[in-house]
Image (tube, helix red, strand yellow):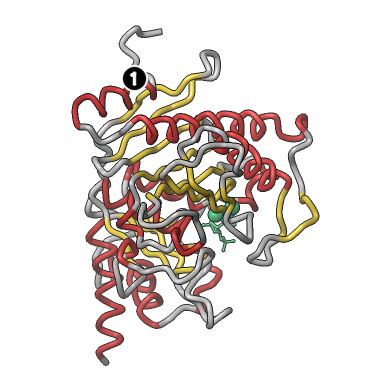
Amino acid sequence: MSSKRVSLSQYLVEQQREHGNIPAQLRLLIEVVARACKRIAIAVNKGALGEVLGSAGSENVQGEVQKKLDIISNEVLIEANEWGGHLAAMASEEMDEIHVIPNRYPQGEFLLLFDPLDGSSNIDVNVSIGTIFSVLKKSPEHEGVSEADFLQPGRAQVAAGYCVYGPQTTLVLTVGAGVVMFTLDRELGGWFLVEQNVQVPADTKEFAINMSNMRHWAPPMKRYIDECLAGTTGPRGKDFNMRWIASMVADVHRILCRGGVFMYPWDAREPSKPGKLRLMYEANPMAFLIEQAGGAATNGQQRILDIQPTKLHERVSVILGSKHEVERVTGYHAEASQQ
Ligand code: AHG
Ligand code: MN
Ligand code: MN
């Protein structure tokens, strides 16, 4: 083991010392979330032996069947974050309403949102899954906390990240000064820095989209993918590769590591919904990370981080990753709306 390893705690302390961007309460928050992710990673890793696989037999507010691990992960994150005094409230994919910090604990200034377990359909088949989180600041102008305090555009995030439970357990983080990655050392039980200044290449030959929905897409989306599929003989003049893990966290992780474009666009299956993914705890944290790594993220019309949310579980169309590809897809949407 190298003695030059930098732990998550050391990294956070040194960042605060050098740049003053991670005050003690935010450091505590990040460390607590990382600790919760470690517990989730252990549960994920035990699989059938830990009796964590399969359905919980309930539904969440979005009408999706909850898996046991969706609920376990949600509980782990709540328990870990309740007592530290760093939060005013939490919100989660798996809870209809916000969870206000109970009176027996002190209230802090931060709001934490999470998708406790992303990629639920992959849990039982041993494919990478993850936890996504977003941190906002509560306005100090009033006492108490309500859902309205959470309805801030993504650009107001003070931190965001995810943990991917894959062949390695990796925590990816931004506090608005670039993107860093830590990997969990299971023997030591600690997170260690493995990558600083993560950059998404502006160009790519790899796209990620659920192709089975193609017939339901809007024309600009269809146009973009048709052109990719046409390869060297088409207007793009190059061959593309496709990847779809069906865990946003793992697809975004690949893009942060080697570039690519991820899309979950609006489709006509449920025309009243803007898309499948949720703005506040899936799209916003991922858009923040991707932008911090030099990529781009839009809903086809608008930068995701500029969208003003109107409700906690709002959905959004997502196009994110390598900058030039995201600009191209967004441009196709603009052209279509002008015609
Ligand atoms: P979740 O498991 O938190 O509900 O999110 C699943 C999301 C996202 O992770 C993934 O990109 C997408 O759903 C997969 O959708 P398909 O089933 O259409 O592949
Ligand atoms: Mn999810
Ligand atoms: Mn989820």
Out of 295 and 207, give the one closest to the viewer.
295
Picture coordinates of residue 325, whole percent (x, y) = 27, 62
Give the class, few, some or many, for how many residues have Cα within 10 Å of label 1's Cα (few <14, many ≥20): few
Out of 320 and 191, give the one closest to the viewer.
191
Residue found 37% across the figure and 69% down from its top: 308
Vertically, is 159 above or below 144?
A: above
Picture coordinates of residue 64, whole percent (x, y) = 68, 62
Q: Is mark 1 within 8 Å of ligand 2?
A: no
Q: In what quadrant of the picture does the C terminus appear?
A: bottom left
Residue found 45% across the figure and 71% down from its top: 310
Residue found 47% across the figure and 55% down from its top: 282
Out of 211 and 281, give the one closest to the viewer.
281
Residue found 68% across the figure and 67% down from its top: 63
Picture coordinates of residue 176, whole percent (x, y) = 27, 44
Quadrant of res 198: top left
Residue type at mark 1? Gln
- What residue is disc 1 on? 10
Quadrant of the rendered image holding ligand 1? bottom right
Out of 83 and 140, give the one closest to the viewer.
140
Instruction: Determine whether, in the image, residue 300 is placed left or right of residue 15.
Output: right
Picture coordinates of residue 172, whole percent (x, y) = 40, 37
